[in-house]
Image (cartoon, grey):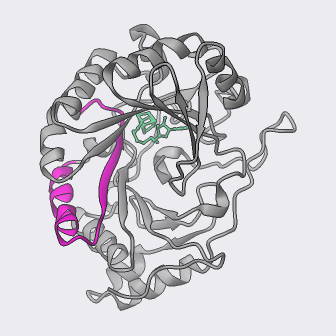
Amino acid sequence: MTAPLIDPFARAITYLRVSVTDRCDFRCVYCMSEHMEFLPKKELLTLEELDRLCSAFVEMGVEKLRITGGEPLVRRGILTFFKAMSRHLDSGALKELTLTTNGSQLGKYAAELAACGVRRVNVSLDTLDAEKFARITRWGRLPQVLDGIAAAKAAGLKVKINVVALKGVNEDELFRLTEWCAAEGHDLTFIEVMPMGDLGNEDRLDQYWPLSDLRAALATRYRLTELSDRTGGPARYVRLEETGQRIGFITPLTHNFCESCNRVRLTCTGELYMCLGQEDRADLRAPLRGSDENGDLRTAIRAAITRKPKGHDFDYSRQQVSGQMSRHMSHTGG
Ligand code: SAM
Ligand code: SF4
């Protein structure tokens, strides 16, 4: 174990999110355009390279690894990668191996993921209405995702449902989604839509449903108790007294979480983003491919961490999207 990764604001970097592919079997309106062009395969890190990179981070103190994308479960051979990472769980160096998925492949993989030591899974699901689901995801089919979620539950995985709050789209399903999660025993987190991807076709500001409004709507039916749970991320939690459920709110557009940020993001091409809301990034593919030893790679990782910014610049407050990022969420991983 080498010295831990500490950024200039004394934050320990213990959480790595890894996008293993930019591809996806869905085309969610807020995430991708309908005719996405994906990266040529040779640009992608191989699974062996991803293993080397993630393992280097684990040696430098990363304790939590979240696999994302694109849709991580459409990457060919991805279970081999999960199996490889499970050795760090076995050694105790890694405390958690987890993933964020659209759920479409969970029916196929949930049991194997559980066998690799995955204990929790985040599944994105914005609606329980099949027709609306098809409209939001363009290519997705709700029954397949619901079957995937059921398979995850049956395999013993704790499921957290992530709902992107979309004004005029799933506003009317707030209670239905909440009650369904309570009945199924799933955690639930609402996410504010972020100004990512191409705003040419879709105006994110029109879809912006502030979570303060969503929360106020919840409070008309439930008693909400503020919880002090902190994950180092942008989520804040409440408990609904009537159901006992924990509900999370991810408000990336407020600055209330940057000071405790413990994470960095690796893209499938080996770029390290030190902040989701900033363009600055470090290329780790060159030092990775440049040598079979990890010395240069470790130096590049440490140099990147010294550039981790204090926070991001998203802002909807002036009724125009500023601080907007041109890259897609599927590139950096959500
Ligand atoms: N395909 C997987 C999935 O959908 O869960 C993993 C990758 S996806 C990019 C990760 C998360 O980002 C999803 O929960 C998705 O809803 C969220 N997301 C994508 N675009 C977003 C946006 N513009 N604003 C807020 N969340 C977004
Ligand atoms: Fe695919 Fe996830 Fe983006 Fe939807 S949010 S298009 S499922 S990567």
* Vertical position of residue 156 compared to residue 217: above or below: below
Instruction: Kindly identify the residue that appears in the image at 62 percent across and 72 percent down.
Output: 308
Q: Where residue 319 appears, x then y in whole percent?
A: 84, 33
Instruction: Kindly identify the residue that appears in the image at 67 percent across and 35 percent down.
Output: 199
* Vertical position of residue 248 compared to residue 5: above or below: above
Q: Name the foreground residue: 150 vs 288.
A: 150
Image-quarter location of ligand 2? top left
Q: Quadrant of residue 147?
A: top left
Q: Name the foreground residue: 154 vs 227.
A: 227
Q: Name the foreground residue: 223 vs 162.
A: 223
Q: From where the camera sits, is residue 127 visible?
A: no
> Left or right: 129 with respect to 230?
left
Q: Which residues are magenta?
A: 76-105
Q: Where residue 159 appears, x then y in whole percent?
A: 32, 35
Q: Where residue 118 appears, x then y in whole percent?
A: 23, 49
Instruction: Kindly identify the residue that appears in the image at 39 percent across and 70 percent down.
Output: 62
Q: Name the foreground residue: 220 vs 176.
A: 220
Is residue 84 one of those drawn in magenta? yes
> Left or right: 45 with respect to 5?
left
Is residue 31 one of those drawn in magenta? no
Q: Where residue 285 appears, x then y in whole percent?
A: 40, 73
